């Protein structure tokens, strides 16, 4: 049996995060190594060392763009997009699958203009199927 | 207090001086007609000057009052705009988060209990109505990045160019300018209004949107190649909206004919935050580790 890919899920919607975990684990191809319900909880686990950070990061980060419990204020929120991009800018290799209720046609082209590979994006919807999620996850992998 | 009442002390003082002069003229001029004529002329001149001074004082008070009223009006408009943004943001966040999440769970439950029809209806409602309404209230892209929101807004409608410090690539060396959310909203709504105005003209075939962040100000220009304005721009709801957003950001705006079309410009002021305050400490440590 081939080795499973590792995935970390970051989504403040607990029910959806649980659903995603089930989808990945039931597929038999993925091993969910962590589930976080706040962006801050995730990035505080990233060690301040490039080698250690690379070891800690999974093959795939499943990220809600706005996965933060921060109270809405005038302060600019730090979003999943900025965190994923900054980590990629440090030459850390991992795939990112954004799943968000935000619909944006420009998101993926903008990300690919920075790093051509390692991105996929799905809009959170009740019509989203298991097949679509797993297919997008495969697309996002940096192989 | 009305302007008339406020100039009353000035008028009373002037009246008292005139009275004194009349009494002096009567006293001195009893036997001398020359003195009487000089004093009469002086009195007339004094009366005319006094009247002019009183009128000027009155109009100055009226102008001050109008300026104060205008300032209060602008402040009120700004507060209304601020409350509106906050409210829209809050409602949209609730729709995007809580409501959509509940609908998603409901759709999933219906599907697992065999009610595929019901599940599909919920999915359709979520995708076609709920998300669109939330977006109309407040584009969620603004929470992520102004550039992302404007890219979506200008997609297939206008050419968008931004200064390098607003590009995503600026995240690499932390040279990004952090635009506060309220200024992002103002910029987005101004571009949206300018774009709609430009594309309303049948002659417009090209619109160029340009944004530049520099020293705590965000400069916006929207240039189209459509029909020029024939006279002064008329006040409209759209222009009032631009005025409200601009005044909220202590900025300025203008619309005028350009070489081959119409140019709308706006300048918004903001408190410039540094990206380092927005980047999590662990990520900053990572950067420092890499530099070593």
Image: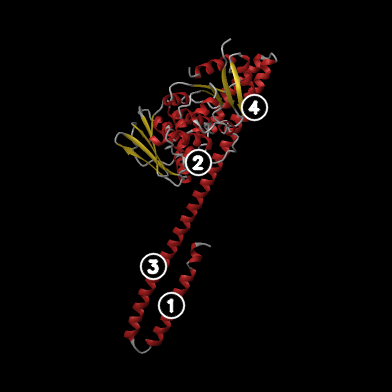
Choose mark 2 or mark 3, whichever is in front: 2
Q: Which chain is indicated by disc 1?
A: B
Residue B83 figure quarter: top right
> Relative to A137, does residue B61 appear above or below in the rendering?
below
Circle number at residue B277:
2
Q: Is residue A77 visible?
A: no
Marks 2/3: CA–CA distance:
60 Å
Marks 1/3: CA–CA distance:
15 Å
Residue B57 figure quarter: bottom left
Marks 2/4: CA–CA distance:
28 Å
Describe the element under mark 2 as helix, strand or loop: helix
Describe the element under mark 3 as helix, strand or loop: helix
Q: Residue furthest right?
A: B113
Describe the element under mark 4 as helix, strand or loop: helix
Q: Nearer the viewer, residue A26 or A6?
A: A6
Q: Which of marks 1 and 2 is nearer the N terminus?
A: 1
* Crowd around label 3: few <14 · some 14–19 · many ≥20 (10 Å): few
Circle number at residue B52:
3
């Amino acid at each position: 049996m081939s080795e499973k890919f590792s995935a970390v899920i970051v989504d403040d919607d607990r029910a959806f995060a649980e659903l995603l975990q089930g989808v990945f684990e039931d597929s038999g191809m993925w091993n969910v190594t962590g589930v976080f319900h706040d962006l801050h909880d995730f990035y505080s686990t990233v060690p301040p060392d490039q080698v250690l950070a690379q070891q800690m990061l999974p093959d795939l980060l499943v990220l809600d763009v706005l996965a933060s419990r921060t109270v809405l204020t005038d302060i600019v929120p730090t979003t999943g997009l900025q965190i994923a991009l900054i980590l990629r800018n440090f030459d850390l290799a991992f795939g990112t699958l954004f799943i968000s209720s935000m619909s944006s046609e420009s998101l993926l082209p903008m990300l690919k203009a920075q790093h051509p590979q390692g991105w996929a994006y799905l809009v959170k919807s009740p019509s989203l199927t298991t097949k679509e999620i797993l297919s997008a996850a495969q697309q996002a992998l940096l192989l | 207090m009305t302007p008339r009442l406020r100039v009353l002390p000035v008028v009373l003082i002037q009246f008292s001086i005139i009275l004194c002069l009349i009494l002096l003229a009567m006293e001195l001029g009893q036997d001398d007609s020359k003195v009487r004529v000089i004093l009469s002329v002086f009195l007339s001149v004094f009366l005319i000057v006094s009247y002019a001074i009183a009128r000027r004082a009155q109009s100055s008070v009226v102008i001050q009052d109008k300026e104060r009223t205008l300032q209060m009006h602008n402040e009120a408009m700004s507060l209304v705009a601020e409350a509106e943004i906050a409210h829209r943001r809050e409602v949209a966040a609730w729709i995007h988060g809580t409501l959509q999440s509940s609908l998603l769970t409901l759709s999933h439950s219906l599907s697992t209990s065999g009610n595929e029809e019901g599940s599909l209806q919920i999915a359709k409602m979520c995708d076609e109505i709920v998300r669109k309404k939330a977006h109309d209230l407040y584009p969620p892209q603004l929470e992520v990045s102004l550039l992302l929101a404007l890219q979506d807004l200008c997609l297939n409608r206008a050419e968008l160019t931004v200064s390098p410090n607003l590009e995503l690539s600026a995240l690499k060396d932390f040279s990004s300018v952090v635009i506060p959310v309220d200024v992002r909203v103002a910029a987005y709504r101004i571009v949206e209004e300018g774009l709609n105005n430009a594309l309303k003209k049948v002659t417009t075939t090209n619109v160029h949107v340009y944004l530049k962040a520099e020293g705590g100000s965000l400069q916006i220009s929207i240039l189209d190649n459509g029909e020029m304005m024939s006279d002064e721009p008329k006040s409209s709801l759209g222009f009032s909206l631009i005025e409200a957003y601009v005044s909220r950001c202590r900025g300025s705006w203008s619309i005028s004919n350009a070489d081959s079309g119409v140019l709308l410009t706006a300048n918004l002021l903001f408190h410039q935050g540094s990206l380092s305050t927005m980047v999590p400490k662990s990520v900053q440590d990572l950067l420092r580790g890499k530099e070593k």
